[in-house]
């Protein structure tokens, strides 16, 4: 019996994924749950397991190819009694693709939440759209289910939302001549482009700048850990900056736990893994957590769920260059702290000028829901903690 396994939706309605590497070859026999291939989405590299035990007849793409959700990945030759694994979706007809809720174990039940291309809709169906499109629709008060989906496999696009909102699309600049499909942004760079565009369009940005005098630090303190500790102190002084904001309400939810996103520079682009509950960790625990998450981020082994649901962001760009910046807040969070390169500045001493080491700080916040006073109180608490000897 021959059957085709299509690329499943790996989460958040992503329309495509790029093949990183195949773990099987044509003609090879595979078992249920055996890794078939690794694919790169906008967030992470994910292993896709085999839904069957059988022989691989054909691989439909090669490493480096971008495959649309619902398109064929693998043809299998199966025994007549073969049934699909519960850890991956069963193969669907060639015009359909399934949504992976999670990679379950064999004894768990796989729940098929939606089928792309199906004409039958139920109350459980979820309109397919990228996160940036969902945020745009929410801001414009548009129901996604009312949009005519013109994207691939029924995906609602930005243009579909704008069309329903009667927003003119004539002001867009013409396409840049000479660019080809090979020049398209992929993976983390594509995700960065989308999130930064959303940040630009959605948030009322305001940035304040100041310096922390750290000349009293004993020896070579761990700068990143001190910054994380200072952020936790700042949140205690002004909890409103550790929050999530929904402009549709408008409503703001102040979060009790500080789940800190760290902006990590990689060859593939900017990735933002999360260190959970930083306010309860010791300096040693924070250093171990930072080292672990950075190593796995740069190796692209970080799990997608480890880059979601953060409440505040730190960008320690000063490890590379730069004194001040205007770091951009990514919704639904409301604030980001940037730390610049340490400087030896001339300051006014008690009786004469002195040279002190100072850390430049840049705090950007969403002025729709954060007042200037709240932002200044937060930054003052951060500076006060950084200026302690240890």
Image (tube, rainbow, N blue to C red):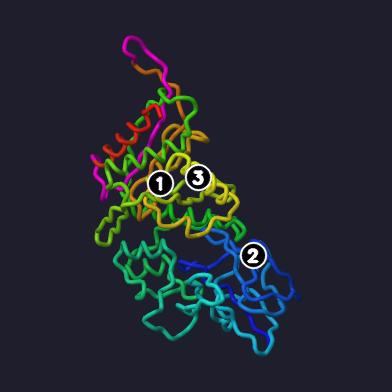
Give left or right: position of 322 versus 329. right
- Residue 135, percent across and down? 36, 62
Q: Mark 1 or 3 closer to N-term? A: 1
**120 versus 256 height, above or below:** below
Going 30% across and 35% down the picture, which residue do you hit? 381
Q: Mark 2 or 3 closer to N-term? A: 2
Secondary element at image label 1: helix
Q: Mark 2 or 1 closer to N-term? A: 2
Nearer to us in this view, 157 or 225: 225
Q: What stretch is highlighted in magenta?
A: 349-373
**278 versus 198 height, above or below:** above
Disc 1 from disc 3: Cα separation: 10 Å
Give left or right: position of 184 versus 150. right
Residue 367 sits inside the magenta stretch: yes
Q: Quadrant of residue 133?
A: bottom left
Secondary element at image label 2: loop
- Residue 253, percent across and down? 28, 56
Going 45% across and 49% down the picture, which residue do you hit? 275
Nearer to us in this view, 21 or 31: 31
For label 1, count other residues whose C-alpha is less than 10 Å away and answer few (under 14), some (14-19) or many (20+): many
**28 versus 245 height, above or below:** below
Read off the residue under disc 2. Answer: 65
> Can you tell which mark lies on residue 278?
1
Read off the residue under disc 3. Answer: 290
Residue 246 sits inside the magenta stretch: no
Please identify the quadrant where the N terminus is shown: bottom right
Disc 2 from disc 1: Cα separation: 39 Å
- Residue 199, percent across and down? 38, 52
């Amino acid at each position: 019996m021959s059957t085709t396994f299509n690329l499943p939706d790996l989460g958040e309605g992503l329309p495509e994924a790029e093949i990183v590497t195949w773990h099987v070859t044509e003609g090879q026999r595979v078992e249920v749950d055996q890794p078939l291939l690794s694919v790169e989405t906008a967030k992470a590299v994910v292993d896709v397991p085999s839904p069957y035990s059988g022989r691989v007849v054909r691989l439909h793409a090669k490493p480096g190819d971008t495959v649309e959700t619902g398109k064929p990945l693998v043809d299998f030759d199966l025994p007549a009694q073969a049934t699909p694994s519960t850890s991956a979706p069963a193969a669907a007809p060639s015009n359909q693709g399934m949504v992976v809720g999670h990679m379950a174990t064999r004894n768990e039940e796989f729940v098929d939440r939606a089928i792309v291309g199906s004409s039958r809709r139920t109350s459980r169906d979820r309109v397919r759209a990228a996160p940036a499109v969902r945020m745009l629709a929410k801001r414009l008060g548009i129901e996604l289910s009312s949009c005519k989906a013109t994207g691939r496999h029924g995906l609602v696009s930005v243009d579909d939302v704008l069309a329903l909102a009667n927003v003119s699309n004539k002001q867009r600049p013409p396409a840049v001549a000479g660019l080809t499909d090979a020049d398209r942004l992929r993976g983390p760079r594509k995700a960065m482009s989308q999130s930064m565009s959303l940040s630009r369009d959605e948030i009322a940005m305001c940035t304040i700048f100041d310096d922390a005098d750290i000349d009293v630090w004993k020896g070579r303190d761990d700068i990143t850990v001190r910054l994380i500790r200072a952020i936790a102190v700042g949140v205690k002084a002004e909890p409103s900056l550790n929050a999530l904001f929904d402009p549709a309400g408008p409503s703001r939810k102040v979060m009790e736990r500080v789940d800190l996103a760290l902006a990590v520079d990689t060859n593939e682009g900017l990735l933002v893994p999360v260190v959970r509950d930083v306010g309860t960790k010791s300096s040693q625990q924070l250093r171990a957590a930072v080292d672990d998450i950075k190593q796995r981020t740069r190796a692209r082994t970080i799990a997608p769920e480890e880059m979601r649901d953060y409440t505040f962001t730190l960008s320690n760009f000063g490890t590379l260059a730069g004194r001040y910046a205007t770091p951009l807040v990514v919704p639904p969070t409301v604030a980001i702290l940037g730390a610049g390169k340490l400087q030896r500045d001339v300051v006014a001493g008690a009786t004469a000028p002195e040279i002190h080491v100072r850390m430049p700080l840049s705090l950007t916040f969403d002025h729709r829901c954060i007042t200037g006073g709240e932002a200044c109180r937060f930054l003052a608490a951060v500076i006060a903690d950084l200026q302690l000897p240890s």
